[in-house]
C-alpha cells in the first residue's frame, strides 16, 4: 500500500471516530458537507509528482505521517505575552490555537453596527443559515485533496461579515498559533464576506510557539461585493519542521478592488494556492507574493486569475529569494474567457538565487479566448548583479552588507505594497532576520 493510500485510510479512521462524537449534529447541513468532502478525498487520494499540478513538489513526507486532527480548543498554558510578540497593535485580533478560537487570548474593539468578527463555529451555532449560504460555495470541496481534507475536518476558523457601506478604519488580524503539541492536523476554515461599497483590511498570520512537526491545512473563502475594497495580507512564519498547505479563493463582484499580499518564510514544505475570479465587469485584482527560503525548504506558489467578465484588470507580482539548498515553484495561470473582452492582465515572476544549490521551477501561463485584450507575462531567474555589488563595495561597504542591501531591495518591491504600516515594519524586520539566518546556515 502506498503512503498516499495509507494517509487516506488514517484520515478516514479519524473521521469515523469524529462522527461518533457528533450525536444529532451528524444530520446537519455542515456535516453533510464534511461527509461529502471525506468521500472526495477517499476517491482522489493525495497527489504525487505524477500529477501535473504537483510535479515539482513531492508531498510524500506529508503523507507518510499520521497527523491527528485537533477537534477541540486547548489554549491552556499559553500566556498573553506569548501572543503579544506576534501582534502588531491592531484593536481587532482574533487568536486561534491549533485552529480553534480562543476568546481569552483575543481582543476585539468597537465595531460598526452589523459587523460580525469572530469564531466560525460560534456563528454556525447562532446563525447557521447566515454562514452556510456562503460556506463551501466558493471553493469546490474537491479543488485539491487538501481542500477536501480541510472540509472533512471543518470545525472552526474566522467568520467576518461586513454589511453594505461599512468602512473599517482598523485592520483585523487573524492570528493562528500552533502550540507545538505533537504531530497534529490543524485545519482552520475562514470565511470573509464584504457587502456592497464596504472596505476592510484583513491580515492572516500563521506562527508557532516552538519547533515541531505538524500540518497546517488552511482554506480561506472570500466574497467581495459590488464596489467593495479589500486588502488581504497573509504572513506564514511557521516552524521550520512544519508543513503548510493553504488555499485562498476570492470571488469579485462588479467594480471591486481586491489585493492579496502573501509572504511565506517558514515551513519545511509549503504550498500556497491563490485563486481570484473576476466575476463581474469593472473588477480589479492584484496578487503579490514573496517567498524567502533557505536550508532545504520547498515553497510552492500556484496562482489562478480567472477573467470571467469583460472590462476587468489584474496585476500580479511574485518574487522568491532562495538560499542554501532550497527550492521554489511558481505556477501562475491567467484565464481570459471568450466573453471577457477589454481585459488588461499583467503577470511577473522574479527569482533571486543566493546560492549555487538553490533551484526554482517557474511556469507563467496565459490562456486567452478573447480577441480584444492586453495581456503580458514573464519570468526571470538570476543572481545578484556583480556590478551593483562592486559599486556598493567601492563606496566602502563590505561584500556581505552590499549583498544584503541588494537582496532587501529586491524583496521590498513586494513588502512596500502592504498598506498596514505595523505589519510592513514587522515584515522588514523578518526579512533582515532571515538574511542573517541564511548567512549562518
Image: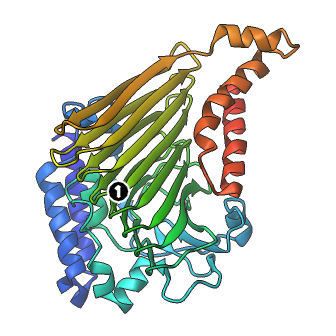
The residue wearing badge 1 is 282
Residue 413: % across, % down: 60, 36
**Is 35 drawn above or below residue 284 in the view shown?**
below
**Residue at (32% x, 38% y) in the render:** 59
**Residue at (53% x, 39% y) in the render:** 290
Q: Is residue 270 visible?
A: no
Q: Is residue 228 left or right of residue 168?
A: left
**Which residue is at the front of the view, 171 or 356?**
171
Q: Quadrant of residue 167?
A: bottom right
Assign the N terminus to one quadrant of the image.
top left
Residue 81: % across, % down: 74, 67
Residue extending furthest toward the right: 396
**Which residue is at the front of the view, 369 or 53?**
369
Number of residues whose C-alpha sits closer than 10 Å to that of mark 1, classed few (under 14), some (14–19) or many (20 or more)? many
**Residue at (34% x, 36% y) in the render:** 332
Q: Is residue 172 visible?
A: yes
**Which residue is at the front of the view, 338 or 424?**
338
Amino acid at each position: 500500500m502506498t503512503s498516499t493510500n495509507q494517509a487516506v485510510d488514517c484520515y478516514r479512521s479519524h473521521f469515523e471516530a469524529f462522527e461518533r462524537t457528533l450525536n444529532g449534529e451528524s444530520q446537519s447541513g455542515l456535516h453533510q458537507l464534511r461527509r461529502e468532502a471525506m468521500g472526495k478525498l477517499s476517491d482522489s487520494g493525495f497527489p504525487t509528482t505524477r500529477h501535473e499540478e504537483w510535479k515539482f513538489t513531492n508531498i510524500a513526507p506529508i503523507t507518510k505521517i499520521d497527523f491527528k486532527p485537533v477537534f477541540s480548543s486547548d489554549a491552556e498554558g499559553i500566556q498573553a505575552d506569548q501572543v503579544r510578540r506576534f501582534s502588531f497593535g491592531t484593536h481587532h485580533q482574533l487568536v486561534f490555537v491549533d485552529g480553534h478560537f480562543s476568546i481569552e487570548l483575543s481582543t476585539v474593539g468597537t465595531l460598526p453596527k452589523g459587523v460580525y468578527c469572530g469564531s466560525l463555529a460560534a456563528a454556525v451555532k447562532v446563525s447557521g443559515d447566515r454562514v452556510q449560504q456562503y460556506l463551501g460555495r466558493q471553493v469546490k470541496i474537491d479543488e485539491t485533496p487538501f481542500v477536501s481534507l480541510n472540509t472533512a475536518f471543518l470545525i472552526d476558523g474566522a467568520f467576518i461579515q461586513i454589511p453594505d457601506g461599512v468602512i473599517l478604519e482598523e485592520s483585523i488580524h487573524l492570528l493562528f498559533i500552533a502550540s507545538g503539541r505533537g504531530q497534529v492536523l490543524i485545519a482552520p476554515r475562514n470565511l470573509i464576506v464584504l457587502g456592497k461599497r464596504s472596505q476592510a483590511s484583513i491580515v492572516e498570520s500563521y506562527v508557532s510557539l516552538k519547533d515541531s512537526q505538524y500540518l497546517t491545512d488552511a482554506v480561506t473563502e472570500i466574497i467581495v461585493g459590488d464596489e467593495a475594497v479589500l486588502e488581504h495580507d497573509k504572513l506564514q512564519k511557521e516552524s521550520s519542521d512544519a508543513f503548510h498547505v493553504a488555499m485562498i479563493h476570492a470571488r469579485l463582484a462588479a467594480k471591486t478592488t481586491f489585493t492579496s499580499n502573501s509572504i511565506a518564510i517558514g515551513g519545511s514544505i509549503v504550498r500556497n494556492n491563490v485563486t481570484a475570479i473576476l466575476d463581474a465587469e469593472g473588477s480589479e485584482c492584484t496578487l503579490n507574493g514573496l517567498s524567502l527560503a533557505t536550508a532545504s525548504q520547498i515553497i510552492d506558489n500556484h496562482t489562478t486569475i480567472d477573467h470571467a467578465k469583460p472590462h476587468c484588470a489584474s496585476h500580479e507580482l511574485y518574487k522568491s529569494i532562495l538560499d542554501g539548498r532550497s527550492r521554489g515553484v511558481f505556477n501562475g495561470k491567467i484565464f481570459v474567457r471568450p466573453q471577457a473582452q477589454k481585459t488588461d492582465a499583467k503577470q511577473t515572476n522574479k527569482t533571486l538565487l543566493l546560492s549555487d544549490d538553490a533551484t526554482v521551477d517557474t511556469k507563467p501561463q496565459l490562456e486567452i479566448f478573447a480577441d480584444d485584450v492586453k495581456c503580458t507575462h514573464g519570468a526571470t531567474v538570476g543572481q545578484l548583479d556583480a556590478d551593483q555589488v562592486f559599486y556598493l563595495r567601492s563606496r566602502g561597504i563590505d561584500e556581505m552588507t552590499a549583498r544584503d542591501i541588494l537582496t532587501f531591495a529586491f524583496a521590498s518591491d513586494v513588502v512596500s505594497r502592504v498598506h498596514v504600516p505595523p505589519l510592513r515594519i514587522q515584515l522588514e524586520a523578518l526579512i533582515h532576520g532571515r538574511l542573517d539566518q541564511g548567512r549562518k546556515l
